[in-house]
Each structure stands twice: as structure tokens, then as C-alpha cells.
Amino acid sequence: MRVDVVSYNPQWPVHFVAEETQLRSVLDHCLLAVHHIGSTSVPGLAAKPIIDIMLEVSSLDRLDEQNGQMEVLGYEAMGECGIARRRYFRKGGDERTHQIHAFLQGDDHVRRHLAFRDYLRAHPAACREYAELKQALAASCQHDIERYCAGKNAFVKEHETRALRWLAGLGPAL
């Protein structure tokens, strides 16, 4: 997989809405919420041009039963794919354009993803620092996605912690 970090594209939210509409049309009542997450959901943030979507569902088993509907939309069901209590779907294979992370409503992963997204939206300095880090990593990782992700890990963990504290009103975000 190529690791290309590009400038923010104002069409990313439009692509998300189009995909959300399709997802809502094929998934049944177990789908409770659809969120645009990840870097493409933060205005102005440089990102890999992959739309990250998070689904909140009432039942992972029920979602699993709908893998065929997801395949109709071009998604490949990947199971937990390394994260307990998640269902992961990708569209476009190794050159994916969209990826879905599905969790039960109220799972800690839901709160963490939304807090990090909202924190970056509300804190321009952290957003700029993250963009610079991602661009530097993309330029130096030689398209090694594991190396790229490992290089972001400390920043993400630190700022997720800050984001959760900020969201809970437990102290300053920075």
C-alpha cells in the first residue's frame, strides 16, 4: 500500500455523505449511527485520501449477517482485523478509498475516535503538528504502512488522552 499524505480536500465530507447514504440504504435497523472519522474528517488536515467511517451498531452478530450487503457496495469484510470488538471493512483492497470501523454503540473505541476527531477540529495547533508529523513520516517511510503508523503512535496516544480529558472537562487540553 502506498503511503501518500495529501493536502486537505474539501470534497472528502461530500464523499463521506454519499457513502453514508449508501450504507444506510443496505444495512438494517442494527445500524444506529454513522460517523466520519480520521484525518479526512478534520477540515484543513493533510491526510491519506481514504475516507474513514465509523458505524455504531446494536449487534456485531447482526452486522456480520449483512456482509453480503456490504460486498454489494464494494466492501471486503475483514472481521476484527486486530482490534477486539470491531468489525473492519475496506473498499478498494490495498489501494483502498474507504474503510469502515464498526463497534457496538457505547464502546470505548467510539468515544476515543470521536474525541480525537473533535479535539483536532477544536485545536488548530495540534492539528498543524499532526499534519507536519504525518507529512514527514510519509516522506520517510518508503511506503511502509507499519512504519508510518508506528511513527504516529505516540502523538495519537498522547492527544487521545488529552482529547478524552478535554471532552470530559477534566482539565486543559494542551
Image (cartoon, rainbow, N blue to C red):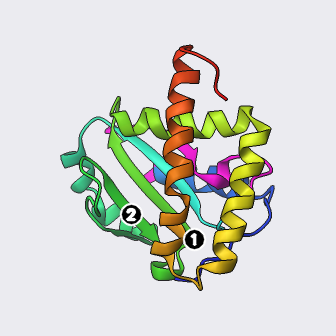
Query: Which label's residue is closer to the chain start, 1 or 2?
Result: 2
Q: From the top left corner, tell me how far across and down residue 104 is, in percent.
A: 30, 37
Decide whether residue 9 is among the magenta residues: no
Left or right: residue 129 compared with residue 108: right
Q: Which residue is mark 2?
A: 89
Q: Position of residue 145 (x, y in %)?
A: 50, 75
Instruction: Name the secondary structure under disc 1.
Output: loop
Specify whether residue 26 is painted magenta: yes
Q: Is residue 78 visible?
A: yes
Task: Indicate the amino acid at tag 1.
Answer: Thr
Which disc is residue 63 wearing?
A: none
The magenta span reads 24-46
Picture layout, residue 26 above or below residue 5? above
- Measure the alpha-carbon separation of dots 1 and 2: 11 Å
* Secondary structure type for disc 2: strand
Q: On residue 97, which mark appears?
A: 1
Residue at 48 percent of width and 45 percent of height: 157
The residue lying toward the viewer, choosing from 90 and 82, is 82
Whether residue 41 is situated above or below residue 131 in the rendered picture: above
